[in-house]
Amino acid sequence: MEVRQESGIQHRLSRRWLACIGAVFGALGLWLVTQGPEPTDEADSESAAAEAAAEPSDAPRLRPDIETNAGPTPQVNILWQLGSTSLYPTRSADDSTIGIADGPIDSSNVVLATGNPLTFLDVSTGDTVPTTLLAFWPVMQHDDKLVVYSTRNGRLATVELGEPFGFVTPLNNDGAFLFRAEPGREPGTVVALSIDDNDVMTAHTFDIATGAELSQEVSDSTFPLEDRIALGGEFQTPRTGGVFRFEGSASMRVGDGALVAQGDGFLLVERCDDALVCDLFWHDSTTFDVLDLPIPDGISDGRVIGDGQYLVFRSDDSSRESLFDLERGGVLVEDVDYQSVSLGPDGRLATFSVGGSPFIIELDTLVRHDVDGINLPEDEWLVRFHRPLLIDMPNR
């Protein structure tokens, strides 16, 4: 394709001619307006009705639970940011009481599972209960069971929650070394990845209650399994583009673009025009309707948690992630360890780690609680599989 370039003189002459023509038409338009009749209320009403009728049917709609809000979602400041050695508060939002607290948290039955050996911290008293479980990282809770991953033999197991701790029941598998584990798409399941000597990746889905392996799904070059497991959902974008929904190993195309984030019924999709100008759009994952929700700057991927209230995201493929409030429209915690952010069972608390050290934040007041004496190994390979986890301890 031939590209024509103007010289500097031609460019300046063109701009002068355009300015002259614009001035003439501007003066003519001003004269016509001043000579016309005064607008009437009836005319204004007709104009407003016409504009409303002309509004496209696929205009963004608000999430159902915030449709009563007038105006855009308010923006708040970044509240906690990673410093050289620790987290520090930046600017306080008007309606927030951020700070650091040494005392216990008012949240009964909730404990923090973290550390090596696996240690439970009672957040209401601050008491710690160490176990004999070495090199086991918590993955998820299901009823009165805690699913853990062993960094020693690459296996999954369950631990009965209660005291004393220490009784471990392995989940059935075919002996494959599992290198990543996440909550499954179906309730009561956990999914883990393995890779064989031929670099073939397989996703193993286990029933937590029985320990049985429910299915195996083999990755292919079109839909890499790790991409879908990392986002923790049923949607994926292949390298050729488009958004696809998965049911088992079957896939169905649901829309154009590239998937950026998903979870709790929401999809964040990037679409580009013919000039490669790209923009991000929130969608309802069932209807694919466009939703009017805030979007953090610089997001590269993420997952929606907390019944659609929060977005955990990375920027520009960073090795760290941030917690974004989709209702208040601001970043609550920035640049913490990748894959470390999770919510507590009652949705009032969030936990994450920075450099392997766990923290807890009360989401209503944004007060941060440091967890002293519980740290992860400095080995980044091990930290990759770990996240501090807030769980509901039964019978307490």
Image (cartoon, rainbow, N blue to C red):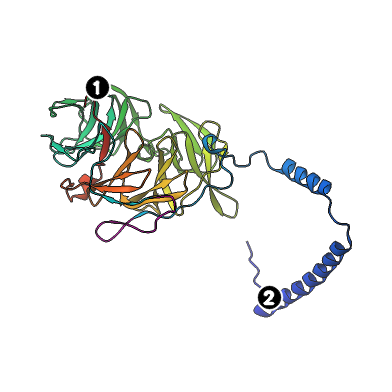
Q: Residue at x 35, y 47 (%)?
A: 366
Task: Name the disc covering residue 211, or none.
Answer: 1
Q: Is residue 86 magenta?
A: yes
Q: Is residue 45 magenta?
A: no
Residue 319 appears in the picture as rendered: no
Q: Return the residue nearer the eye: 152 or 239.
A: 152
Query: Percent x, y for residue 222?
Result: 42, 39
Mark 1 neighbour density, 10 Å: few (under 14) some (14–19) many (20 or more) = some
Query: Percent x, y for residue 35?
Result: 89, 63
Residue 299 appears in the picture as rendered: yes
Q: Is residue 112 left or right of residue 4?
A: left
* Quarter holding residue 18: bottom right
* Quarter holding residue 190: top left
Q: Secondary structure at mark 2?
A: helix
Q: Which residues are magenta?
A: 81-96
Give the label, 2 or 1, closer to the camera. 1
Main SS, magenta residues = loop
Q: Return the residue nearer the eye: 383 or 65.
A: 65
Q: Secondary structure at mark 1?
A: loop
Residue type for callout 1: Gly
* Quarter holding residue 29: bottom right
Q: Look at the picture and state if 165 lies above or below 354.
A: above
Residue type for callout 2: His
Which residue position holds label 2? 11
Q: Which comes before the other along the chain, label 2 or label 1? A: 2
Q: Quadrant of the N terminus?
A: bottom right
